[in-house]
Image (cartoon, rainbow, N blue to C red):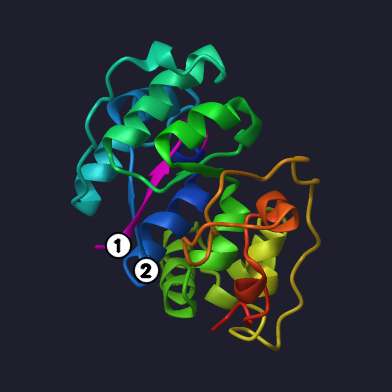
Amino acid sequence: MSTIAFLDANILAKPFTRTLLWVGSRHSDFAVTWSQRAETEANRHLRPGATPVGQLRERYGMTLGPTGADPERFGSTEEPDRQILADALACRSAFLVTEDVDDFGLVDLASCGICAVHPDLFLAHRLSPDGYRAALEALSAGMSRPARRPADVHTQAGRVHPLLVDAMRRVYPEVTPAPASHDHPHEMFRGTSCVRCGRTLRSPGSVLCGVGPVCASIPPDR
């Protein structure tokens, strides 16, 4: 069974990142899911005229995960995100992919055995080169004319996902990615399991970065 990554609303509301995860997961060692709560919140933050997430979900043949019970038990998590954590637990997720890692309490995450991880960090360690190529092809095909090559999309990906683009540098060795357009949040991981292999993190340094020493020594585009 593949590792399950639960997608927060702020991931579902961003077409570029969403496509990397949706399409890339089909060629990688993880599966993605989300709940009705996450989808409803994502739809509220879509740009005017954007296709609702539910319509896209049906087009991709994906299904919603279950709704979790008793969200108020997660007292160290921000109130609006308690249901999201409960849903991630109900989906048996190992990772909760979110841009707001620090909204989820350490104690609550530990009680569920779930790690909250920023999408760039997650993708850099879990997306396969084949998954990356497939996602860039889907993104380039969906962009307005004139059509852009996957390599051009790779260049622009550096603005929002610099860790991923660096991990995939050997996929498009002739391309110089665009520089990051903004800084990452101070905290990109909360949990006790390696983002890459899922093993328990032992050292304080590994817990801070989300990757164990063995996995950190492996070339990203394995």
**Structural distance between the alpha carbons of marks 2 and 1:** 6 Å
In x, y percent, where is residue 164?
A: 63, 65
In the rendered structure, find residue 135 and report the number of the disc placed on it. Answer: none
- Residue situated in front as seen by the camera: 1 or 42: 1
Q: Residues within 10 Å of mark 2 (few under 14, many from 20)?
A: some
Picture quarter with the C terminus: bottom right
Res 2 label = 1
Q: Is residue 52 visible?
A: no
Tag 2: amino acid? Asp
Q: Secondary structure at mark 2?
A: loop
Residue 3, quarter of picture: bottom left
Asked if the stretch drawn in magenta spans residue 160, the answer is: no
Q: What's the magenta region?
A: 1-10
Height in image: 109 above or below 137?
above
Marks 2/1 in contact by CB < 8 Å: the verdict is yes
Looking at marks 2 and 1 on the same chain, the residue that comes earlier in the sequence is marked by: 1
* Residue 197 image offset from top left, x and y in percent: 48, 67
Badge 1: residue crowd in 10 Å (few <14, some 14–19, many ≥20): few
Is residue 7 located in the magenta-colored stretch of the structure? Answer: yes
Q: In percent of the image, x 77 and y 65: which residue is there?
A: 178
Residue to which mark 2 is pinned: 29
Residue at the front extreme of this rendering = 202
Identify which amino acid the numbered label 1 is placed on.
Answer: Ser
Q: Up-down: is 158 above or below 173?
A: above
Q: Is residue 106 in view from this perspective?
A: yes
Q: Residue at x 46, y 74 (%)?
A: 128
Which residue does the image show at 43% across and 41% down from the upper left? Answer: 113
Residue 141 placed where, x, y %?
A: 42, 66
